Every structure is written in structure tokens, then in C-alpha cells.
Amino acid sequence: MDVSRWLIAGLGNPGKKYGFTRHNAGFTAAEGVAEHCRIAIDQKKFKAHFGKGEYAGSQIIVAKPGAYMNLSGPPLRQLAGYFNIPIEYILVIHDDIDIEKGRIKIKEKGGHGGHNGIKSIMEAFGSGDFPRLRIGVGRPEPPTATTDYVLGRFTAEEKKLFAEVLQVAEDAVLTIIRKGLAEAMNQFNHRQAF
């Protein structure tokens, strides 16, 4: 399997307003991967911010769509086409309310599960055959609406937890690049929550 080039795409909403919110967990994790690989996300094309570098013998492009979450697909589709990256080497990092806080889960492919960013990417590519790294943010306590919850900032207690989870997410991405999806799923999908 040729793993010489990866597009690592973190999902989120652009702008300071959304900053360190639950819905921007993908942005934050992608930034951590870029920092580890000494990649500056300082280029812009197709309404996406991205940077290029290398890790473990693979070419890496770390990207953050500059459009809002529900419009993430077209920028990534154009970037992937421009850099000639097949869909199975586009790793999308995103928040997931169906996974408990303190856990991550890697999937080889699948549906959108109600996540608007993933839905947009599936529509843009005409397929769900791309790997995902899902960062659990848990569900809100009633009566908080899901939208308000995911667009809300982390509590002080959550910040410490998510700093640890984002480090694990970064390690998982690097493991995928080095050893492949199967090895990473085996290593990270069964880890206990913090």
C-alpha cells in the first residue's frame, strides 16, 4: 500500500468567535499534528488554509477548510484533486457527540452520523470512503441544545481533559501515517477514557 502522501483535514468553523469550542476539536487536533511535524499552516488555496511537510517518509498536507463546517467538502475536494490524493488517504478529524468525553475513535469509512462537516465532504466526493478520527465531546445535559453545546467553549474542567485527548489524537494521526489504519485502530479504539 502506497502511503507516500496524506491529506490531514481538521474540521471546524473559521474565526476567533469559535476558537477553542467543542465543534473545533478537529481544527485544534490538526494544528497539533502540524506543530509536531513542523508544518506551518500558512498557505491558502480553494478556501482552505494548509501547509506541507514530511513525516516518517510520507508527504503530509495539513489543512483546515476556511468555509464553515457545513461547507467543508468543496475546499477539501479541490485540495485533494490539486495534490492528487486519493480519498482513502484523506484523514478527516472531527468532533463527535456520540463518543464519550475522553475517548477517540478511528473509522476507515462510513456515513455522516448527522455531522454536517462529514455530510458536506461525502456530498463533495460522492463517497464516504475516507478515514476519520473522531474526538468524543459527549452529549449535552438537558435542556442544553446540541447546537449550543458543540458551539460552546470547553469548561475549565473539560480543558484539562481535552488537552490530554488532543495529545492522544495527535499520536493516533502519526501512528496512522507510520503504521496504517488497522494498527492505529487496534491501538487507539479500545483505550479507556481519561
Image (tube, rainbow, N blue to C red):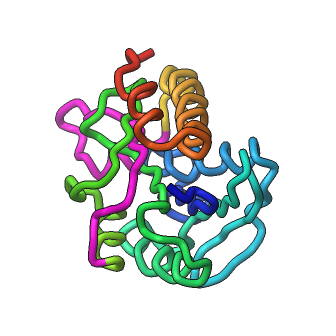
Q: Nearer the viewer, residue 50 or 185?
A: 185
The residue that appears at 57% across and 63% down in the rendered structure is: 7
Give percent across and percent down for residue 174. 61, 40
Q: Nearer the viewer, residue 134 or 55?
A: 55
The residue that appears at 51% across and 22% down in the rendered structure is: 161
Give percent across and percent down for residue 110. 24, 55
Give percent across and percent down for residue 165. 52, 28
Q: Is residue 57 left or right of residue 116?
A: right
Q: Is residue 40 magenta?
A: no
Residue farthest to the front, as pictured? 1
What quarter of the picture does the C terminus occupy?
Answer: top left
Q: Main secondary structure of the magenta part?
A: loop
The residue that appears at 52% across and 82% down in the rendered structure is: 81
Question: Does residue 70 lie above or below 35 as drawn?
Answer: below
Q: How many marks?
A: 0
Question: Does residue 177 lie above or below 130 as drawn?
Answer: above
The residue that appears at 49% across and 61% down in the rendered structure is: 89
Give percent across and percent down for residue 76. 49, 74
Question: Does residue 56 lie above or below 42 as drawn?
Answer: above
Q: Is residue 71 left or right of residue 154?
A: left
Question: Does residue 69 lie above or below 94 as drawn?
Answer: below
Identify the magenta region.
Answer: 126-153
Q: What is the quadrant of residue 124 in the picture?
A: bottom left
Q: Is residue 50 left or right of residue 53?
A: left
Q: Is residue 151 magenta?
A: yes
Q: What is the quadrant of residue 69 in the picture?
A: bottom left
